[in-house]
Image: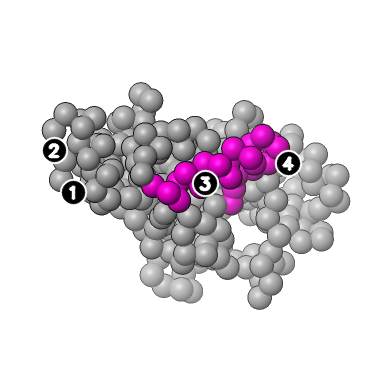
């Protein structure tokens, strides 16, 4: 199977609306705003064939209704969140044939498996297949989403689920937060050489106004403090910040997340 072409459409300040496309079809992930999507489709002469949502926040679903006025397409999204325009309610399933656990896009011969990754929101899902991961606001490059509806335990386990995917998986996050995340990560884990290298690369990309995404699972495992809660240097930093010794990845994760919230 050929890997489909993935393109970023920028929206709002720092959102990415990801487009899976060939020479005449497009599927969009998290169209928070319809206008830039419609402009892109028109410019590229593409027909919209599907909308995929990862969670209910308006900067990820706000463009659904206006896109549906132009194109009659299926709208996939989390079963456990209130998104009025959904036509297919999804949740993770162990059954590879399950309709609610998979999205098949025939135009691209692409099957994406649904992963339940609660934490940022209660019903947040990701789409994974063909070495692609669309993870919305759960995993960011060198960071993770805020805990709006879930617990630290849920988020830590969601992130570990994503960390368990193939190393070469390309990670398409919902926002361009990488540079700011690295500033925090460097304080938490100053001795991480892979992180220092990534910081230099990201600085160059941002100076040229180029997206720092996709990242890869291998890159995130090497540089993202929220996936590295068992590393001695990170446990030390989190414990120092908390003012007490922390044991176990969930308590380290919770301390890091709380620290980052006020960073
Ligand atoms: Zn969100």
Earlier residue among tags 1 and 3 = 3
Foreground of the two, 104 or 206:
206
Asked if the residue under mark 2 is in contact with the one under mark 4, i.e. CB atoms within 8 Å, the reply is no
Report which residue position mark 3 lands on.
Answer: 198
Q: Quadrant of the C terminus?
A: top left
Q: Find the distance from the CA under tag 1 to the CA under tag 3.
A: 27 Å
Q: Give the residue drawn at x 53%, y 36%.
A: 179
Give the secondary structure at mark 1.
loop
Give the secondary structure at mark 2.
loop
Q: Is residue 138 visible?
A: no
Is 202 positioned to the left or the right of 159 in the image?
A: right
Earlier residue among tags 4 and 3 = 4
Badge 2 residue CB within 8 Å of ligand 1: no
For disc 1, the neighbor class at 10 Å (few under 14, some 14 to 19, many from 20) is few
Q: Find the distance from the CA under tag 4 to the CA under tag 1.
A: 43 Å
Q: Find the distance from the CA under tag 4 to the CA under tag 2.
A: 48 Å
Q: Position of residue 80 (x, y in %)?
A: 41, 47
Q: Which mark is residue 37?
A: 4
Secondary structure predominantly adopted by residues drawn in magenta = helix
């Amino acid at each position: 199977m050929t890997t489909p072409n993935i393109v970023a459409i920028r929206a709002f300040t720092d959102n990415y609306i990801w487009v899976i496309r060939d020479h005449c079809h497009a599927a969009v992930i998290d169209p928070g705003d319809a206008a830039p999507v419609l402009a892109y489709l028109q410019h590229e002469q593409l027909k919209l064939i599907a909308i995929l949502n990862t969670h209910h926040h308006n900067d990820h679903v706000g463009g659904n209704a206006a896109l549906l006025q132009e194109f009659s397409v299926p709208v996939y999204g989390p079963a456990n969140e209130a998104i009025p325009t959904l036509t297919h309610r999804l949740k993770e399933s162990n059954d590879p044939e399950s309709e609610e656990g998979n999205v098949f896009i025939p135009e691209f011969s692409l099957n994406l498996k649904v992963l339940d990754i609660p934490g940022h929101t209660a019903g947040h899902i990701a789409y994974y297949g063909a070495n692609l991961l669309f993870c919305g606001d759960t995993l960011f490059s060198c960071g993770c989403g805020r805990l709006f509806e879930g617990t630290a335990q849920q988020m830590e386990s969601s992130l570990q689920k994503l960390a368990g995917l193939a190393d070469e998986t390309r990670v398409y996050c919902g926002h361009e937060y990488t540079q700011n995340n690295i500033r925090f990560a460097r304080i938490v884990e100053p001795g991480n050489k892979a992180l220092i290298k990534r910081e230099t690369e990201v600085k160059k990309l941002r100076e040229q106004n180029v997206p720092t995404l996709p990242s890869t699972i291998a890159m995130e495992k090497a540089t993202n403090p929220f996936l590295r809660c068992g590393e001695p240097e990170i446990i030390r930093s989190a414990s120092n910040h908390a003012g007490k010794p922390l044991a176990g990845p969930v308590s380290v994760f919770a301390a890091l997340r709380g620290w980052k919230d006020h960073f």
